[in-house]
């Protein structure tokens, strides 16, 4: 008897689409509030998952369908896509020209950023579960989301562990200001990558005490990121061009073939050039640059968008954190060294910043979906579910863009901008010098060496530079403490211990994230 094929719920199913639109508005509001008031945005996947779970518990027949894990996965995909889409991919880029005093450039930047974010999420849809971005790699927030949904569905011991982790995460965040979500990531992500990330956070945060100077004054983190980023890109190119030895030696059954990697990068690069052209024409850059310089700007902007996206994606896959702000700053400095005028630089950094966040966020959501769908055991069902997640993410992004366009003036007229926008504008206004170029080249060398030593699987250089660029030393101490505890548990309890840490880590992320959401955004119970 032939087995009946499983049918995945559609993102355009009435009940799912309506809920996705509502959750997307919530996610977009959360993202806008956090990035303008705190300078960061948070992964709202778990919030979306918990809302779906709570709705499914309401004793109304119409709402029972929300108890289905695959529907819950589509809902959490939409809300998280809207959060990062609104905050990181759209509002942040349009704030740069506004602060520069060029409000006439906001509309072309808005159109370009929205288009770039759509390409960004399309790229991870193409690249997820290839040899470059395997589904089996950590993508820590994705694991946290999936474990949350599993625990709610299965209850039992796993739910108890998740509850313990959630309570602990909430207590640590609320009463002790300890970023327990980072602790959870340390129990889930790549140990080598996270160790370098933690070291980078500590060195970057305490550099004045350690060295008597702020390493940012000498562009140390930026140079290391440039060196590591270039090597990381070369490593990816080598992976693409290297043929698999044989199918018998391939222990990983990826759902996307190697040909998809080249297809995605080539198609993405062409699309990024087209968007750069649209931005340039819409902003009238042809009136401020020569024809040759305009072509150079478009090519450089497309390369920056693509490389930034890859760097952000690799960091997100291994550590659950992504250096989108940092990579955009690096390409801004490089653009300054090339000699682009200020308006072109503002659009360049905004364009670069718009690529990466949607890529990373959807990677997390696809990881959660991959786990929920059985980790690729049914390739046809997996690919269909992934396609529906793509539509859900697109729904969230479209809602986010509509909301941003409706309210961005309300934020900007109150002087509420993503803080990193001020860094970009200050950098543009200050200009640069050959001395800056010297520092960048000098520190690019150790960054490249560290990245080569770690290889493409560990991303040591990228994660070290990411840590250096974030002024959050307590997070570094938390990461290293978490890794030491994880090592001790795994040493004693082996795989069983690691499996428990996965669920506890997911709980820590959930509890810490929810407390941060309610205390920072809704101002409820704020101490």
Image (spheres, rainbow, N blue to C red):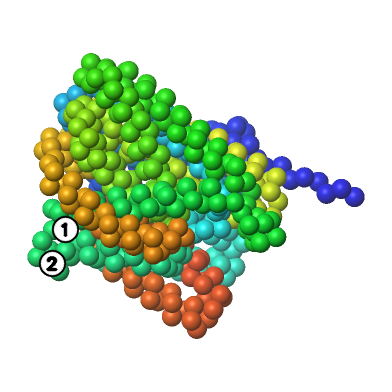
Q: Name the residue nearer the viewer: 389 or 448.
A: 448
Q: Is residue 18 left or right of residue 6?
A: left
Instruction: For marks 2 and 1, give the CA distance.
Output: 8 Å
Residue 57 visible here = no
What residue does disc 2 label? 211
Q: Residue at x 13, y 43 (%)?
A: 434
Q: Name the residue nearer the viewer: 471 or 512.
A: 471
What residue does disc 1 label? 215
Residue 344 rendering spot, x and y as whole percentages? 24, 27
Residue 157 rendering spot, x and y as whole percentages? 57, 70
Point out the image quarter for the C terminus: bottom left
Q: Is residue 180 above or below residue 48?
A: below
Q: Residue at x 32, y 18 (%)?
A: 281
Q: Is residue 343 above or below residue 493?
A: above
Q: Name the residue nearer the viewer: 197 or 358.
A: 197
Residue 249 rendering spot, x and y as whole percentages? 66, 61
């Amino acid at each position: 008897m032939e087995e009946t094929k499983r049918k995945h719920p559609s993102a355009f199913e009435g009940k799912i689409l309506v809920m996705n639109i509502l959750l997307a508005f919530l996610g977009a509001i959360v993202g806008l509030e956090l990035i303008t008031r705190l300078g960061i945005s948070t992964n709202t996947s778990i919030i979306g998952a918990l809302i779906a779970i709570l709705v499914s518990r309401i004793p109304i027949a119409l709402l029972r369908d929300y108890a289905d894990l695959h529907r819950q996965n589509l809902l959490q995909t939409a809300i998280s896509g809207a959060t990062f889409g609104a905050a990181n991919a759209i509002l942040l880029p349009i704030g740069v020209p506004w602060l520069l005093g060029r409000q006439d450039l906001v509309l072309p930047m808005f159109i370009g950023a929205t288009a770039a974010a759509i390409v960004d999420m399309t790229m991870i849809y193409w690249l997820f579960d290839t040899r470059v971005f395997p589904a089996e790699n950590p993508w820590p927030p994705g694991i946290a989301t999936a474990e949350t949904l599993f625990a709610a569905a299965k209850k039992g011991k796993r739910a108890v562990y998740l509850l313990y982790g959630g309570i602990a995460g909430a207590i640590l965040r609320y009463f002790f200001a300890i970023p327990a979500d980072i602790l959870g990531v340390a129990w889930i992500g790549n140990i080598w990558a996270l160790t370098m990330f933690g070291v980078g956070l500590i060195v970057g945060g305490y550099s004045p005490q350690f060295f008597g100077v702020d390493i940012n004054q000498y562009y140390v983190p930026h140079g290391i990121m440039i060196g590591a980023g270039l090597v990381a890109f070369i490593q990816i190119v080598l992976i693409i061009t290297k043929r698999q030895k044989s199918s018998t030696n391939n222990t990983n059954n990826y759902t996307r073939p190697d040909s998809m990697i080249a297809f995605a990068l080539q198609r993405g690069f062409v699309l990024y050039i087209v968007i750069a052209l649209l931005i340039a024409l819409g902003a009238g850059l042809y009136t401020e640059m020569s024809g040759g310089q305009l072509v150079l700007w478009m090519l450089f902007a497309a390369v920056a968008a693509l490389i930034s996206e890859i760097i952000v994606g690799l960091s997100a896959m291994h550590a659950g954190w992504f250096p989108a702000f940092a990579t955009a700053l690096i390409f801004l400095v490089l653009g300054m060294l090339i000699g682009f005028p200020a308006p072109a630089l503002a659009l360049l950094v905004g364009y670069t910043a718009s690529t990466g966040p949607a890529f990373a966020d959807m990677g997390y959501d696809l990881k959660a979906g991959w786990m929920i769908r059985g980790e690729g055991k049914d390739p046809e069902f997996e690919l269909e579910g992934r396609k529906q997640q793509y539509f859900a993410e697109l729904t969230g992004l479209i809602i986010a863009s509509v909301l941003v366009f409706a309210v961005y003036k309300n934020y900007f007229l109150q002087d509420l901008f993503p803080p990193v926008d001020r860094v970009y504008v200050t950098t543009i206004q200050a200009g640069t010098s050959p001395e800056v170029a010297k520092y960048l080249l000098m520190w690019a060398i150790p960054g490249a060496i560290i990245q080569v030593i770690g290889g493409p699987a560990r991303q040591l250089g990228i994660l070290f530079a990411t840590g250096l660029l974030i002024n959050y030393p307590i997070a570094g101490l938390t990461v290293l403490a978490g890794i030491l505890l994880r090592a001790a548990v795994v040493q004693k309890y082996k795989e069983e211990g690691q499996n428990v840490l996965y669920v506890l880590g997911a709980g820590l992320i959930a509890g810490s994230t929810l407390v941060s959401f309610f205390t920072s955004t809704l101002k409820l119970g704020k101490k």
